[in-house]
């Protein structure tokens, strides 16, 4: 619905409610005088009854659940009470003069009507305060829920960022500079990886799985003689006690089997050299 039809609809509703209040005000004013209210109290009495009805109506639009049901019951109860007072005002012509008269010829009915008329202001204080407290508490709870819902949104964004990290890592792995045969660290271009670096700073890096064979840096295969030469150079100043297969494997970066073979070869060479040196000395 457009703006102006809405404004006209609300204005028409306010007009109807105002006219209905004026009609109801006459009856409630006379009933208040009949039960002993003075001029000022009788003047304010209709605002107490119909005013609480308006407050209960607003509460039904704001509240939810059991609080809304309570507001509907208050609205229904005061609507019925206002209807009864208007009905009695129409049945008893003596009320129209504004004096103190009986609301019914039968005494028990008169007592009930007087109790109803005099209890409505007290009920308005109780129910009105309760409705206002429920409305304020409902608004505070809703604001708190909105603040708490902001935190999962941040966590969800962080989770999405975590999920995007493997994709960024895969893009870096497929970069032509990383596929080169040079095992030394390669400096990437400044334009493409900038976004990836920022993403890694904001979220912990996660495992990316096994690197494809096509993305691995090729390493040339060395012959046994080349491995022995590298091991001989790396362990030239090592004492015999440190000449182990694991230490040799780490020094020349080879397999465990090759490490054991190189250890045996190097120990045999050193033993042969020691024997030759002993024979020469003897």
Image (cartoon, rainbow, N blue to C red):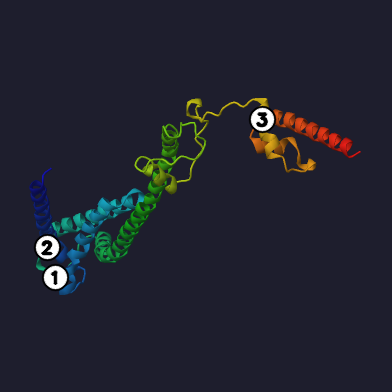
- Mark 1 and mark 3 lie on one chain; the one further toward the N terminus is 1
From the viewer's perspective, tell me whether residue 85 is left or right of residue 128. Answer: left
Q: Report helix, strand or loop for mark 1.
A: loop
Q: Report helix, strand or loop for mark 3.
A: helix
Q: Quadrant of the C terminus?
A: top right
Residue 255, can we see it?
no
The disc placed on residue 227 is 3
Instruction: Name the residue located 9 percent from the left edge and 53 percent from the top edge.
Output: 11
Dot 1 alpha-carbon crowd within 10 angstroms: few under 14, some 14 to 19, many 20 or more: some
> Which is more toward the observer, 21 or 138?
138
- Mark 2 and mark 3 lie on one chain; the one further toward the N terminus is 2
Marks 2 and 3, how far apart in space? 113 Å
The correct choice, above or below, for 219 with respect to 130 in the image is: above
> Which is more toward the observer, 216 or 252?
252
Percent from the top left, x then y, of residue 86? 16, 57
The correct choice, above or below, for 126 with respect to 226 in the image is: below
The correct choice, above or below, for 52 with respect to 282 in the image is: below
Q: Which residue is mark 1?
A: 99
Percent from the top left, x then y, of residue 226? 65, 29
Percent from the top left, x then y, of residue 198? 39, 46
Q: Which residue is mark 2?
A: 26
């Amino acid at each position: 619905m457009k703006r102006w039809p809405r404004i006209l609809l609300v204005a028409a509703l306010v007009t109807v409610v105002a006219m209905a209040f004026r009609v109801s005000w006459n009856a409630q004013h006379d009933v208040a005088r009949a039960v002993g209210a003075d001029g000022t109290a009788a003047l304010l009495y209709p605002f107490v009854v119909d005013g609480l009805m308006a407050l209960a109506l607003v509460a039904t639009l704001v509240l939810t659940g059991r609080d809304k049901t309570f507001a509907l019951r208050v609205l229904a109860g005061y609507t019925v009470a206002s209807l009864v007072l208007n009905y009695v005002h129409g049945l008893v012509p003596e009320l129209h003069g504004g004096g103190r008269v009986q609301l019914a010829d039968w005494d028990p009915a008169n007592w009930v009507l007087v109790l109803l008329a005099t209890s409505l202001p007290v009920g308005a204080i109780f129910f009105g305060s309760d409705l206002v407290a429920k409305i304020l508490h409902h608004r505070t709870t809703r604001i708190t829920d909105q603040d708490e819902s902001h935190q999962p949104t941040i966590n969800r964004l962080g989770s999405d960022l975590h999920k995007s990290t493997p994709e960024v890592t895969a893009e870096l792995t497929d970069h032509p500079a990383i596929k080169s045969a040079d095992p030394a660290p390669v400096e990437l271009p400044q334009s493409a990886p900038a976004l990836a670096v920022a993403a890694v700073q904001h979220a912990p890096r996660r495992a990316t799985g096994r690197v494809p064979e096509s993305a691995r840096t090729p390493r040339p295969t060395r012959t046994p003689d080349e491995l022995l030469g590298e091991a001989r150079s790396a362990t030239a100043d090592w004492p015999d006690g440190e000449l182990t297969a694991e230490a040799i494997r780490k020094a020349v970066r080879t397999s465990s089997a090759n490490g054991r073979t190189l250890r045996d070869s190097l120990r045999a060479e050193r033993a042969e050299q020691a024997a030759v040196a002993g024979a020469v000395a003897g």
